[in-house]
Amino acid sequence: MNTRFHAVVVAGALLVFLVLSCATALADYYDNFDDGQYCQDPNDPDLFDPNQWDIDNPHWTIEEVLGDTFLADASDGWLRLYASSAWDMYMFIAAGAHDEDLDPNTSATYFDDSAPHYVMARVKVSDPNTGESMLFIHGDPVTWTTYCASLEHDDNAFRCVWLNGLDRIRLGRVDLPHLDETNGFWVVAQLDADGDPNHSYFRMAAWNGGKYDWDGVWRPDKHILTTWDPNTYEYWGEGLSGVAEMQGPQAGDGDAADAKFDNVEIRWGTFTNTYRTLTIKMKDCCDLNIEPDILADSNNIDPNNYNPVVDPDNLRRYTNGTAVVLDAVVPCGNKSFKKWTVKGPNDSGDPLYQIVVDTNEVVYLTMDGDYLVKATCKCGGGGMAPPMLSLLTLGALALLRRWRVGGM
């Protein structure tokens, strides 16, 4: 079995431990807000567990800074961030999916400069004449400091901004072609780093159409330390990531900071316009869990080019290099789990093509090619294979090291 495909088997508490450990190490998280909520209800133990980190449905925290009126709402499947003020002042509202643990050594949501990572989202603007939509990296909600990609709606300008309180240092500006602010456009902010501040670059891009319709050109593309005096401004090597909406002090006449965000993806790695497909099939299995579960539906691709025959509900699309976990197979009726069959990557004519059959309950894939995964259940007993502790230990350690340190 080559390094493209990793499978381990665990039982009971070991499964929970492994899933939580991987999430903590990875820090990746995704949300399409299809459940109509941006956070779990802390008063309902069935909806909120402070010890549980779900990369597909994280607990978003809303940070309100200045302004008089704030609103965060996801009831229509987009996360709306709104702030307004009757005074001539800044308004700022942000959403970060941190897990209440602000220790960068243990938090599932802190990113540091040891490897590249990015924030991306689909953005829809309420008023194209006011406000700024922001994607931020290495943010600190206490000191209000961050690197951010800022799109100023009134002049369709995209800026790399270094934010320190109300001190906004613009590192670069690019005039963009018209973005479809009414129906939504894509934005990505990429921090390329390798642990050395002198090698760090902050890059941005925005485009219309589908998630992978980007032309591959970063605009702007800034070497961070060459844009200001490093003895005056601090280099931030770690912090939270998320999305935000801002309005400058020119408001005060009823203008508001108002935008919506969808299909948020925040993860280790480098964003590319190359995607990989994952096709899921089940035989006598009624359900299974996929993390992250990113369907190739009209929310993820250009709806004008969407073909339900080519892109059925069982097809997923992932940015090249995404780590995917498949587990928690639910057999139909009185059946039990039997095996996984993994075919790929690419097609049968590719020299890397392979077919892997495995009876382990938990499967880890690195989406470096196109895969077909089939879960098969059978009649009678059998169930989960006995725990293989040596494989668990070696597999988990190798996986965490490759995903966390290598940045995928």
Image: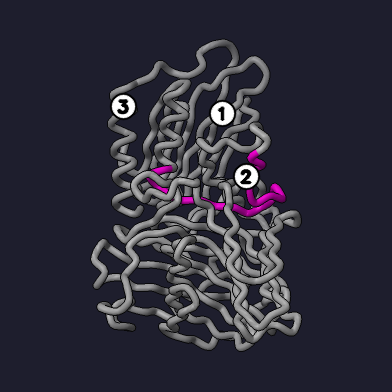
Q: In which quarter of the image is residue 218?
A: bottom left
Q: Can residue 103 be seen in this view?
A: yes
Q: In the rendered structure, are the residues bearing label 2 and label 1 in contact, judged by CB atoms less than 8 Å apart? A: no
- The spot of residue 142 in percent (x, y) is 47, 61
Q: Which residue: 31% across, 27% down?
A: 391
Residue 79 in the figure: left or right of residue 177: right
Q: Mark 2 points at which residue?
A: 314
On screen, residue 32 above or below 305: above
Which residue type carries mark 1? Answer: Val
Which residue type carries mark 3? Answer: Leu
As measured in the structure, the alpha-carbon distance from the residue carrying label 3 to the one carrying label 2 is: 30 Å
Upstream in sequence: badge 3 or badge 2: 2
- In what element is the residue under mark 3? helix
Q: Which residue: 42% across, 30% down?
A: 17
Q: Mark 3 points at which residue?
A: 391
Segment colored magenta: 24-42
Q: Quadrant of residue 54?
A: top right
| 166 or 151: nearer the viewer | 166
Upstream in sequence: badge 1 or badge 3: 1
Q: Is residue 99 highlighted in magenta?
A: no
As measured in the structure, the alpha-carbon distance from the residue carrying label 2 to the one carrying label 1 is: 15 Å
- In what element is the residue under mark 2? loop
